[in-house]
Image (spheres, rainbow, N blue to C red):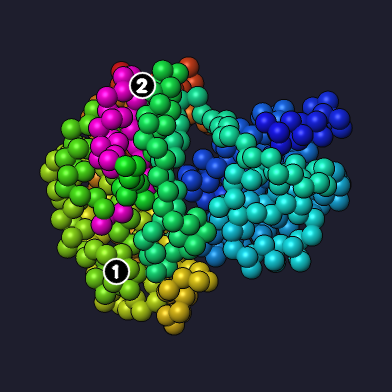
Amino acid sequence: MFYIEKIKDFFKSKYNNYKAFVKVFGCRQNEADAEKIRGLLTAAGFEFTLDADCANLIVFVTCAVRHTAENRIFGHIGKLKNIKVVNPNVIIVIYGCMTEQKEIRDKIFFSYPFVDICFGAKSINVFSKLLCEKLTNKVFNAPHEKKFVKRTSKFKALVSIMTGCNNFCSYCVVPFVRGREISRFSSDIINEIKNLSKNGYKEINLIGQNVNSYQDKETNFASLIKKIDEINGEFVLQFMTSHPKDLSFDLIDTLAKSLHFGRHLHLPLQSGSNKILKLMNRKYTKEKYLEIINYARMKIPDLTITSDIIIGFPGEDQSDFEETLSVIKKAQFTSIFTFIYSSRSGTAASKIPDLLPRSEKVERLQKLKNLQNLISEKILAKMLGEIYRVLVDSYKDGFTKCRTRGNVIIKLDKDYSKFIGKFVDCKVVYVIKSVVYGKIL
Ligand code: 5AD
Ligand code: SF4
């Protein structure tokens, strides 16, 4: 606790109460990193605020996956300047995938000099050291602090099982900013989940850039699922993200037999054209993809499948796009996330000329969304009259939000806050477009 104690001493000597504002951009991996950062800060005596103006410490956890994310984050960093003018003592920290890139750190150093600490996602373990050194203006050589986690939710937990990625999909910056795959010890993961279950957690989310390639000595992802299945308690097991090339029939068989597995697969397709899939270095064909999901649905009839699609990858012509639409019709996803291709420096795809006009990409994106909306509506309409065991998630503006085991949201038009974090049975009473409404039985 060397660094943490020093951080604590620094803030205690200045303030009676001191608060941190932590803002997260991007994926669940970043949410998990934020829980680690909050854990360290809690140990150092911080409370948390949702108002950056009141904070003594501001931390941004950043994302680099698309240019639009970076632009948005720079907009937010720019706004911190005023906060620093009003409160020159506030410490500003920018962390994450975006600041793992040297050119971004240089840009922040030169153009946003009010930022105090800027470091990348590979260096999360040195956060307390960096903060301590900044505050004291000294250099220390004590070992890194052990991990602290402050969980955001009392019933949903993120459990990181691996970080990094070895796949090098040609468009993706993740292998560069997160590094190669590192799996956690399976015994640590199992202990963590046992404790969570004992403490009443109802949803366990295994997270990793590519969970299917989890490997710790003799434990692979399928055997990890089997071990988790032996843990007592009523909890739903979700995981993301899966890569189609690693979703074997064996793993599907294991999932089909699993009691805890939540009946939802997020399986990014990215494109329905074999030519584009090859250029993307995805290592499967559309035929293989459809074969996998058909097998999964045969083995797990109540399975919900969602996906990610990138529009306008360099070289995607009209016929490639139409192939994507055709696979979308066959795949029958419950929902998809759609993205316009964004060139990321250092990636293989950034060297392929990106000639398609943006207007054309936007038009394709809209066509894809329209098609998917029709499919989603049809799939959700089939839920009418059915009964689901749901986990009550949250309450807002007159509606209680619940999730089925397949991760579909059901809204209840009453205040059931008292059931948040509990399982209840619920019947779907109407479906309007893509919104499913139910009532508690
Ligand atoms: N451009 C657009 N979308 C991207 N994604 C990853 N990299 C890029 C990029 N350069 C999308 C993929 C991935 C999701 C998390 O983000 O669809 O599955
Ligand atoms: Fe990026 Fe591909 Fe790795 Fe996913 S599998 S993180 S898309 S390189």
Residue at image position (26%, 53%) is 246
Image quadrant where residue 158 sits = top left
Which quadrant of the rendered structure holds the C terminus? top left
Q: Position of 90 compared to 319: left or right?
A: right
Residue at image position (81%, 46%) is 138
Q: Which amino acid is tagged 2?
A: Phe
Q: Position of 207 compared to 33: left or right?
A: left
**Residue under pointer 2:** 423
Q: Which residues are magenta?
A: 218-245
Residue at image position (35%, 65%) is 367
> Do the numbered discs 2 and 1 sit on residues whose CB atoms are within 8 Å?
no
Q: Looking at this view, is 338 or 375 the one in front?
A: 338
Image quadrant where residue 144 sits = top right
SS at mark 2 in the image: strand
Q: Which mark is residue 303?
A: none
Q: CA distance from mark 2 to mark 1?
A: 40 Å
Q: Position of 396 compared to 99: left or right?
A: left
